[in-house]
Image: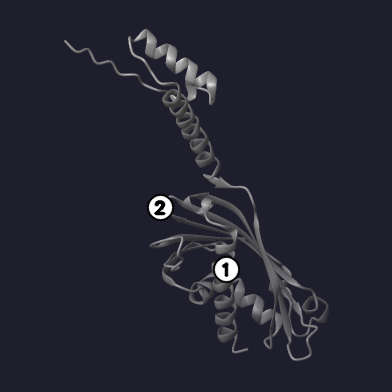
Amino acid sequence: MVVKSRIVIEPNRFAAGASGAGLLRKLAVCCGHRLDCNIGMAAALAATSFTEAASRASRLVMASEPLQFGGVEHFTASSERVFDVVTDLATLARILPDVESSEQPDANTLRCVVRPGFSFIRGKLNVTITRHSTDAAADTATSSDAANASQPLSASYRVVSKAIGVQITVETSLRVGAASDPTAQSALHWQAVVTERKGLVAAVSTALIRAAAEKVIQQTWQRLGEELGA
């Protein structure tokens, strides 16, 4: 009669090195088996490697390194006209690249379905843009009110993009004022910070994400210029 026994190795119960191998040998002797030292050590090291890999995977669930973008765009349209366009959510839905559909559930929220075509994100993204604030001067500045018209106009947004196993959150701020460039009338200063990268996208290199984001940003500014006719 042949009696077969099964030894279950729990990764968290064994340490790497000789101590793990020794424990496995003792366990094998108790079961009436002989276990080669090298096999025992290999099993212990494999168990430890499994634990370390699981630990690394859990750390990749959310990337902690922020990505930042920023710059200045110049337009021949007035500051008020530029500000009106970039703070109008319906217009943003037309300007943003790769938007397949959009809806505006309230005055400060825009929801879009986007197919970005990124190599690291397959399929569609559900994007929610929330307008946090706009400068009150935008509503009061007129061509006859030089004091208000000379003040920069500002707005801020939160952009949350979600797909299966992916979430990206971006905080964006805009400031529109007079241009120092004599060939332009207005300057749009902008900054975007990726504050969260959760799920599968957390493991994607920042260089790859930056390259993809910069392409979308350039397309957006080009579309804004076309919208403004500037």
| Marked residue nearer the N-terminal end (1 or 2) | 2
The residue singled out by tag 1 in the image is 211
Look at the image and tell me in which quarter the C terminus lies: bottom right
- In the picture as drawn, the residue positioned furthest to the bottom comes out as 183
Kindly identify which numbered label has been placed on residue 164: 2
- Residue 11 lies in what quarter of the image? top left
Residue 217 appears left or right of 3: right
Task: Tell me residue 24's x, y (percent).
Answer: 44, 17
Q: Is residue 201 above or below residue 124?
A: above
Within 10 Å of disc 2 (Cα), the crowding (few <14, some 14-19, many 20+) is: few
- Residue 191 lies in what quarter of the image? bottom right
Tell me which residue sits at (53%, 21%) in the image: 18
Disc 2 is placed on an element classified as loop
Task: Tell me residue 167's x, y (percent).
Answer: 50, 53
Q: Which amino acid, by three-letter code, is at mark 2?
A: Ile
- Please say if the residues under marks 1 and 2 sit with CB atoms less than 8 Å apart: no
Q: Which amino acid, by three-letter code, is at mark 1?
A: Ala
Tell me which residue sits at (30%, 18%) in the image: 6
Q: Nearer the viewer, residue 51 or 46?
A: 46
Look at the image and tell me in which quarter the N terminus lies: top left
Tell me which residue sits at (62%, 48%) in the image: 64
Q: Nearer the viewer, residue 96 or 207?
A: 207
Task: Tell me residue 44's x, y (percent).
Answer: 47, 26
Can residue 84 be seen here? The reply is yes
